[in-house]
Image (spheres, rainbow, N blue to C red):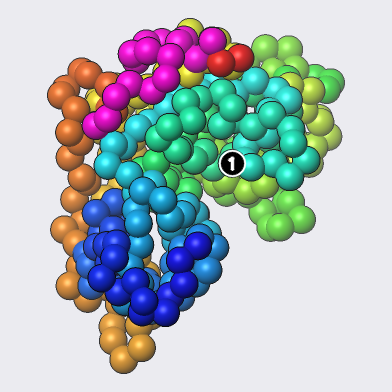
């Protein structure tokens, strides 16, 4: 870890420049984020003037690590059960990062419980991660839950209208019975164990839970444990679903919000249309982009 003592003033890149490059807003906005104490470098709150090595330092905004390396990658993983959605598990359990290439380093976008299966996005695109996980965006997530017992149509309607949980009522959702004891539920929120708690609240605890869609991303052929890169079109669709890149909310000392803002337009991706979204750098270990290649990582 590098001390923030001025000794390295001429080394590395200015933190606000790195933040701006990965889509966190204009440089001015990124300066405000730093000044507001929302940016950490290697776990320590950064101060204005901080320089970083974007290849080595771990930079996070509001606790979410942002990918700062040149090549942006986007992986869709079909998470199996028994794997935890974390970058590093103190208990040494298998993590989702064990299932995808180690380099470039990626981070899961949101989380699935250890017992939940299904689609999980992993990327080093910090700007997109921030938007997709921010509570105000609410990209749709679709789940199929096999539950105990046979829920009535009335119970399923309760899921649609919102149920009371211990952290407040759920927002209206889409819910349908798609088989005996099988509910398809589409929610916009991302609260902890939300689907399990919702089903429990209607008296039908979940036996098996699978996430089948994240916004525009679905893939019925991706096997459990397998991953693939998103196509460029899929990344564009995800960008659209997440909405325009916002000015992060900041309350700088002596200034207004988001001065000198970024364009707010989605960033264009380097890869050609129809190709995969990996922008730069060699292919991840295991060869070129192809569906199910991650089978080897199981
Ligand atoms: N809801 C849950 O209950 N669990 C998940 O893993 C995701 C959504």
Q: Which residues are magenta?
A: 280-296
Taking the image as shown, residue 118 lies to the left or right of residue 272, namely right
Q: Depth check: 211 or 66 in front?
A: 66
Q: Picture coordinates of residue 135 (x, y %)?
A: 49, 54
On the image, numbered disc 1 is attached to which residue? 87
Q: Residue at x 81, y 31 (%)?
A: 205
Farthest residue to the bottom: give it: 254
Residue 159 visible, this angle = no
Taking the image as shown, residue 229 lies to the left or right of residue 2, namely left
Q: Picture coordinates of residue 173 (x, y %)?
A: 56, 39
Q: In the figure, 68 relative to 248: above or below? A: above
Quadrant assignment, res 153? top right
Q: Depth check: 292 or 3 in front?
A: 3
Quadrant assignment, res 224? top right
Q: Residue at x 36, y 79 (%)?
A: 6
- Around disc 1, counting alpha carbons within 10 Å, would you say few (fewer than 14), some (14 to 19), or many (20 or more)? some
Query: Element at badge 1?
Result: loop
Q: In the figure, 56 relative to 144: above or below? A: below
The kind of secondary structure the magenta stretch mainly shows is loop
Q: Is residue 207 magenta?
A: no
Q: Quadrant of the C terminus?
A: top right
Q: Picture coordinates of residue 284 (x, y %)?
A: 38, 23
Q: Residue at x 65, y 20 (%)?
A: 80
Task: Confirm or reject: label 1 Cβ below 8 Å from ligand 1.
Answer: no
Taking the image as shown, residue 294 lies to the left or right of residue 209, namely left
Q: In the figure, 215 relative to 53: above or below? A: above
Residue 95 visible, this angle = yes
């Amino acid at each position: 870890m590098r001390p923030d003592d001025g000794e390295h003033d001429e080394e590395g890149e200015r933190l606000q420049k790195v933040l701006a490059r990965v889509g966190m807003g204009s440089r001015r906005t990124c300066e405000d984020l730093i000044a507001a104490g929302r940016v950490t470098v290697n776990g320590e709150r950064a101060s204005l003037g901080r320089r970083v090595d974007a290849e080595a330092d771990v930079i996070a905004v509001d606790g979410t690590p942002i990918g700062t390396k040149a090549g942006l990658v986007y992986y869709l993983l079909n998470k199996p059960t028994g794997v935890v959605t974390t970058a590093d598990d103190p208990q040494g359990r298998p993590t989702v990062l064990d299932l995808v290439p180690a380099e470039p380093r990626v981070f899961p976008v949101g989380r699935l419980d250890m017992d939940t299966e299904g689609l999980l996005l992993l990327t080093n695109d910090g700007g997109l991660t921030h938007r997709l996980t921010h509570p105000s965006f609410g990209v749709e997530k679709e789940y199929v839950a096999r539950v105990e017992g046979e829920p009535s149509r009335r119970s399923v309607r309760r899921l649609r209208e919102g149920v009371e949980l211990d952290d407040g009522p759920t927002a209206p959702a889409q819910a349908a019975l798609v088989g005996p004891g099988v509910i398809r539920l589409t929610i916009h929120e991302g609260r902890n164990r939300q689907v399990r708690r919702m089903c429990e609240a209607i008296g039908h605890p979940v036996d098996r839970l699978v996430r089948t869609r994240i916004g525009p991303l679905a893939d019925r052929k991706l096997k459990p444990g397998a991953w693939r890169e998103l196509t460029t079109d899929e990344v564009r669709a995800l960008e659209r679903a997440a909405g325009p890149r916002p000015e992060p909310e900041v309350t700088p000392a002596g200034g207004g919000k988001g001065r000198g803002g970024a364009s707010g337009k989605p960033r264009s991706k380097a890869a050609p249309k129809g190709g995969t979204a990996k922008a730069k750098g060699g292919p991840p270990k295991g060869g070129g982009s192809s569906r199910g290649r991650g089978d080897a990582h199981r």
